[in-house]
Image (spheres, helix red, strand yellow):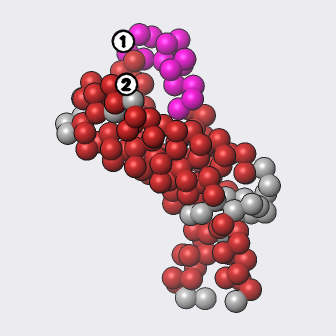
Amino acid sequence: MKTGDIVKWKILDTGNDSKLIFARIITGLIFISEGIQKYLIVSMLGPAYFEEIGFGHPMFWAHFTGAVEISCGILILIGFLSRLASIPLLIVMITALFKVKIPLLLTDGFLTFTHEYRIDFALTLLLILLIFYGSGKWSVDLRISQKTILS
């Protein structure tokens, strides 16, 4: 097996676990929804929000983040390149933790932080799960990896 084939196999490799579809549906739909909202609810989640939390060029960052959330969310939902698609979303989650949630912890206390961080925490764990285990049984990744192995 060539190096390129090994890398491709590692990215697409996934178990035959049917339960991973639940993680993909939850993660994919939430990120698609959040990405769309960055374009539609401009005052709450779009450029105004990015400006409020201290990003320079808030229009760029709102649209860039929305596009990443939508495109990677779709990839995760269909189970195509889920491991790779999870990485930019994990970066979004880590950025949100440091730019929004930790300052909230410092200003409003632990209980407010835990309340506000609960969904982000769950999504972060789901993304880590997808990075480690792949897309699962009903995924494009599994179909491609099976064809590659059979070829």
Q: Where is residue 147, by image quadrant?
A: bottom right
Q: Position of residue 15 (x, y in %)?
A: 74, 63
Q: Which residue is mark 1?
A: 107
Between circles 1 and 2, the one closer to the viewer is 2
Q: Where is residue 63, by image quadrant?
A: top left
- The structure residue drawn at horizontal position 36% and vertical position 21%, both measured from the top left corner, is 103
Q: Give the residue type at disc 2.
A: Met
Disc 1, SS:
helix
Residue 90 lies left or right of residue 23; in this view the side is left
Confirm whether the magenta stretch covers residue 97.
no
Extent of the magenta region: 105-120
Q: CA distance from mark 1 to mark 2?
A: 20 Å
Q: Is residue 137 in view from this perspective?
A: yes
Q: Give the residue type at disc 1.
A: Thr
Is disc 1 in contact with disc 2, using a CB cutoff of under 8 Å? no
Residue 7 lies left or right of residue 97; in this view the side is right
Q: Is residue 124 above or below residue 52?
A: below
Q: Which residue is mark 2?
A: 44
- The structure residue drawn at horizontal position 48% and vertical position 18%, both measured from the top left corner, is 113
Toward the viewer: 5 or 142?
A: 142
Q: Position of residue 133 (x, y in %)?
A: 67, 57
Whichever of callouts 1 and 2 sits on the residue coming sooner in the sequence is: 2
**Circle 2 Cα neighbour tier, 10 Å, few/some/many (<14 / 14–19 / ≥20):** few
Quadrant the C terminus occupies: bottom right
